[in-house]
Image (cartoon, rainbow, N blue to C red):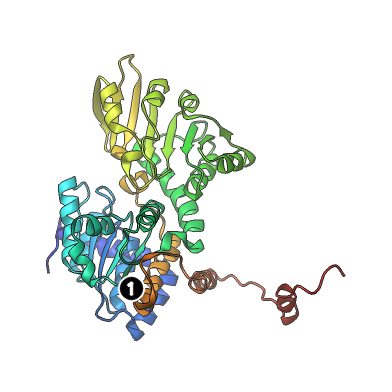
Amino acid sequence: MDHHVKDIALADAGKARIEWADRDMPVLASIRERFEREKPLSGVRVSACLHVTTETANLMRTLQAGGADIVLCASNPLSTQDDVAAALVLHYGIRTYAIKGEDTETYYRHIDAAIAFKPQMTMDDGADVVGRIHAEQPEALEHIIGGTEETTTGVIRLQAMAADGALKYPIMAVNDADTKHLFDNRYGTGQSSLDGVIRATNRLIAGRTVVVSGYGYCGRGIAQRAEGMGANVIVLEVDPLRALEAVMDGYRVMPAVEAAAFCDIWITVTGDLNVIDHDSFAAMKDGAIICNSGHFNAEINIPRLREMSVSSREVRPLVEEFTMPDGRTICLLADGRLVNLACAEGHPASVMDMSFANQALCAEYMVSNAASMAPGVYGVPADIDKGISKLKLETLGVKIDTLTPEQAKYLASWQEGTI
């Protein structure tokens, strides 16, 4: 079976970790059991470009149980867990192209291998496969019925394509499901980003000033977790409504250049480019640590940082220290790539349980409905979203009330006013 992984001898260790994660993914496991019986994806070729982690491996197992034929490649050069990639090939028979630390040429060669599979469905995290198909390999569109997208950055790119009339097939925005962004983005990114910073630096968070660029669900999660660990949090925003929300949540809000003077640790989660740039580098205090938890490392203007510095050195694995002309140092983590995946293990399995349940069920939905869906970006159907919520509550042993017929009727009526 064709593949490209770092070391197939790592497979047994990867299998053990995949099984460990599976213990905390009961919703996905229940879907896998049904898929095994019903085979809703029988014969469907799926090219998935996702972070190759233990949680992703359990999604691949679920799609495979449903009958899908899968190729998996990495959606970020530093997010691959090499033992997991090896296990997917050796123990689960899934063609996998992913090596942690792969260079840009190898990264796109792996994506091309996924496209060469002639997929009927794409499953993206950042829209790199979709973008490459449309821009450079449009012949692959002949076989594709639809796709899914996992992350905010990818959804933004796809919406831009759709607005330009460039998107040629329907794609479901898994990221926008409530059971994804309300939990994965907030609790997953919040915990895993701080985990990545701590593993990379071994610095105490308490008493530090943590600057968070962006106050979407990911930024909210990071701010909450940092505050909970004793940090003083500053939020940076360009949206006045979100900035106001951050103020009302108790955080300081100010322009980036002002925040740079206070910053001990700076984490970006905006999905935009050059969020940390020349003026901020010039204003930063000595020893500031900067990192990114958005999808692409464009959020930090790394070429500008290199131009401004007089030297750089690796002081710890994935920690590059830049010395400025005035003697100040700025430390960049993981070359600006996803700090939660490059320096840690990404989101905990229990939260990815819901995200990947959405992926599996949206793949099933796409197979059944793609023929009637025009090219465009689609939301996750409400019944899928609520169904996952119910399953998750059941696995947690949580019971909730239900409306009485009288209550349901009252909520659905307009005739009754003040009694």
**Which residue, given by chain and number where applicable, does mark 1 sit on?**
62
Q: Quadrant of residue 291?
A: top left
Residue 285, x across and y down, in percent: 42, 22
Compared with 370, 24 (above or below) is above
Residue 301 falls left or right of residue 203? left
Q: Amino acid at mark 1?
A: Thr
Taking the spot 48% from the left edge, 63% from the top edge, the residue there is 177
Taking the spot 56% from the left edge, 33% from the top edge, the residue there is 253
Outermost right residue = 419
Q: Quadrant of residue 158?
A: bottom left
Residue 135 falls left or right of residue 244? left
Which secondary structure lies at badge 1?
helix
Q: Is residue 11 visible?
A: no
Residue 232, x across and y down, in percent: 54, 33
Outermost front residue = 165
Compared with 348, 278 (above or below) is above
Residue 243, x across and y down, in percent: 57, 39
Q: The C terminus is located in which quarter?
A: bottom right
